Amino acid sequence: MFTQFGSTSDTLSKASTMVFRIGTDAHLYDDPEDVNIAPLLDSKFDSEKCEALKRLLALIAQGFDVSNFFPQVVKNVASQTLEVKKLVYLYLLHYAEKRPNEALLSINCFQKDLGDTNPLVRAWALRTMAGIRLHAIAPLALVAVRKGARDPSVYVRKCAANALPKLHDLRLEEISSDIKEIVLILLGDSSPGVVGAAAAAFASICPNDLTLIGKNYRRLCEVLPDVEEWGQIILIGILLRYAVASIGLVRESIMYSLQSVEDSSSEKNDVANNFTSANEDSEMNGFNETALTNMISRCYNEGPDEYLSRLSCSNEVFPKMDDGHFVSIKENDDIRILLQCTSPLLWSNNSAVVLAAAGVHWIMAPRENIKRIVKPLVFLLRSCDAAKYVVLCNIQVFAKAMPSLFAPHYENFFICSSDSYQVKALKLEILSSIATDSSILSIFNEFQDYIRNPNRRFAADTVAAIGLCAGRLPKIAKMCLNGLLSLIRQDTSTCDNGAMDEEAAVLTQAITSIKFIVKEDPASYEKVIIQLIRSLDSVKVPAARAMIIWMVGEYSTLGDIIPRMLVIVAKYLARSFISEALETKLQILNTMIKVLLRSKEEDMPTFKVILGYMLEVGKCDLNYDLRDRAAFIQKLLSSHLDMEAPEESLSKPRDQSWELAERIFGGQLKPIQPEPINYRFYLPGSLSQIVFHAAPGYEPLPKPCTLDEAASTSGDGDSYETDNTESSSGSSDEEDSASDYSSQHSLSGSSGRDESYGANRQHENAGADPLIELSDHGSTHKIQNGASASGSAELDELMSKNALESWLNEQPNLASLSTSEKAEVRRSSARISIGNLGKHVIRKNYQLLDPATGNGLKVEYSFSSQISSISPLHVCIEASFKNCSAEPMTEIMLTHEESDKAIDSKDEILVRSERSSTSNNTVTTPVSMENITSLGPDQTVNRILEVQFNHHLLPMKLNLYCNGRKHPIKLHPDIGYFVKPLPMDIEAFTAKESQLPGMFEYMRRCTFTDHLGKVNDEKNESPIEEDKFLLICKSLALKMLGNANIFLVSMELPVANFLDDATGLCLRFSSEILSNSIPCLVSLTVEGKCLEPLHVTVKVNCEETVFGLNFLNRIVNFLGNPSVSNQ
């Protein structure tokens, strides 16, 4: 080509490729082994850094491992160029999990970028920080997300919403309630873009916590049309679920009509056997009164347990939904607002949005307004095949429940030549459901064209649809029968020409449809049965022949002509018996018995001879099913089929064998009964509706009117209100993140593990009072200390004049003092000592292995206060092994899952700092336990486990071997037992606390309620009321000592307090970290009345920042959760 110019096709192709590559970064993929990347990363020019980073990302896209450049890339995170910073963030996201130690070095830069003036930089930093999946930085990432949720930039707030599911995927129970709080904040945002992202976060994190929606329901409805398309889909589902749970279903909707249809159907005899035809004059009254439609509304609210119970229920009577679960739309504005805001979305460009909006109207809209979903759904049929199939799957359910809804639009469901087979099958089923007397002629003409389609599978489906239409509309049954009979004649001639395999399905389906129509009124279709019997010789398909032969036996006594044909038909079947297929042979035997049982006396000898011949031939057949059937029949009628003396057998009276044969083979066909519904309907627009089973993540609608509105105003209200009142002291900008983290809200969620108090719980002796030692103790408290105890302001704000004046205004007792008295207040306090407190401490039991999954072995454990003798890094655990089975167990041992493997790099980084500080350099086993050789039935054996966790937040994967079987288990750590008691007096405690101020001090608040149950019990049961302050002190001390291995230093109470005021009560605890012997001090300061929930300020002083913060979270968690005994 163009050889005169010296060019070829290859050179022209290369030239065109080069032209298209001009101005792009395609050249970055040319040299994967480029050695100039490292110098470019260290260059002082930003353009060269960008070039190097682009090359690295190109190598990552090609599958190369370029993690060796991680240190050089990380140092460029502080670059001021946006392009460089963005490329560095992309690289960090990809390799942060592989290089966690280096990734932690960039946290300070992320925190600095979170305060940048450019919202893009703030958003990038937030997205990258949340995308680094490391448990160690999860608290800092949560602080960043909380800050981003209140950012003035919409883009940053949207990134904060998108970051919440990433934090939730870390499965840290300590931050779960804080994540929900941020979701609530973002749901109340004024920007539609943020609301859409917040809805996605809500659906991923807490889809069933609908109390978060109640405060913003109407505003979410109003902003719904402005949310992005994919956010609209999620938000529509959330609003629908909330409306059903809080308000209920609509009385004027089709859901209520489907409920009432079941009641009215019991008064009609034949309504369950046929489809109710649509009424053209009254468009909204054509409901499908079958068991299928009666189940739709129930299935929308039906969970998996209810579905399984329905399958196991023999009868079909289900309890009707309470009428109180239905409300009138005229009386409720919330439902009307939801319908008004979703109406414009019915004409959205996104087909998924249209389906979601149509689902809301289908469930909640009044019957007269449901027709507004028809045209949008029909319009979606012009989209691609994939979307068309999804829409048709939903229209199929709508059409079966309410045929008249789509009956006027039947022409939109005619088949197109470009439709896929799945779409054609759905359209045929819909057409057979919505056909009416006025439209059936047009539909039948279309069906005649479809039968000639080259795709014979589709032609067979069309024949089945004709049979369904004939069953629904008896007026056209004869017309359908004539067409089906002519089709049988055509197919039999085609089969003779050698195309039997292609036409077999069509011929079989045609005879099946005729059989279905004849069953409705056999006497009217005697000539049809005769015509089928006469065509028996031309029909060669075994399944079709078997159905015709079945009709011979079933209708052998019908009319006058068929009984006279039976002898000829029986002789014909006897001659062809040997050459028939298996299913035809089995049907011939059944038919001959029916004919014999119902035959006249003069024809009975002939039928007995023919049946005897068939049985003899059948016993010699190669198929064992046919041989068994023939032997069974011959044994059953042996006395009546005597071949040697047939005259004698005729004179024998009919015995029990003859009656048994009549019961088995001679029963008349009973009227068709509706089959029980053993499948489910799913919500419109859901994936489960397409795949016909509950897809992962599918949730049915909540039960109507089950949402407790009081939960939205209580529960977490205290934690939300303390957002700006909790503080932690800090003295430098570098500790801002730690300070922000320490001001998080108290966690009120569960620990994520099955917690239970031990069965051997010790009860308190009500008759013995504890030893109480009271001593006057004067202590001078500075104003700053009082403020620290209350935890109501930060230290720098407290030192300012305005903050000091505002704080004094909130203290009426201090406001009345003079200036000199305000500077220093002297209070008298009593130091309380409770004797024998240790015997009342209750350790919590956790379940490690359930008997159902452990083949009868039940394992429970609790953390022990013992100190390990192996290593300071080991934690002692008391484990209880119980055999709940009836068989003995042997060789019970516990091993670490990764004992023979290298420690994962991420976990190694988390424990490196702890291991480096200890002097013990010997290699120890992660888990140490004495093996159990045998364990008898109902026997319990206790063992001490010494476990070395990789981190105080990460569970340890173990393998429990019993009877040679391996049971993978997870042992969750408790940070409260990563410390040991550090005995000291009050003076040493105060001196050590003064050495750990500022950045080593962390505070949070929580609400304590365990004392309320004990105070009420003392009032009701004991004639002598125990001191309420002692009960509060004992409750706090036992709660702390039962959840952490710490030392109780002192309990002090101001003497000047009122009798019912516990404000000023202070408990001090001391401990030291096992791994490095660093002291960790805990102080609890109480505020509030004795008979009311107490506000407890928890303060932790520790040099280990991360450990101190996590220890503080753990203390707030178990103090804020009521004990099991008080619930």
Image (spheres, rainbow, N blue to C red):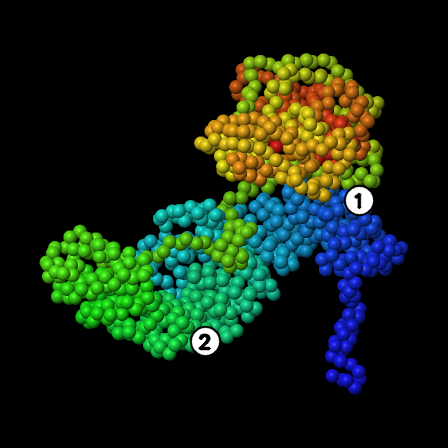
Residue 354: quadrant of the picture: bottom right
Question: Which badge, 2 or 1, is on the more N-terminal residue?
Answer: 1
Question: For the residue marked with disc 1, what is the amino acid?
Answer: Leu
- For this view, does 908 lie left or right of residue 997? left
Coordinates of residue 1123 in the picture (x, y in percent): 58, 29
How many callouts does the rendering have? 2
SS class of the residue under badge 2?
A: loop
Q: Nearer the viewer, residue 807 or 1051?
A: 1051
Label 2, label 1: how far apart the Cα atoms are: 69 Å
In the picture, the disc for residue 454 is 2
Mark on residue 105? 1
Q: Name the side, left or right, on which 691 lies relative to 285.
A: right
Say whether residue 594 is visible: no
Q: Dot 1 surroundings within 10 Å: few (below 14), some, or many (20 or more)? A: few
Is residue 507 visible in the rendered image? The answer is: yes
Q: Is residue 190 above or below residue 604?
A: above
Secondary-structure class at tag 1: loop
Seen in the picture, residue 644 relative to 915 is either above or below; the reply is below
**From the image, which quarter does the C terminus lie in?**
top right
Residue at 82% over, 40% down: 734
Where residue 227 sits in the image (x, y, percent)?
Answer: 64, 57
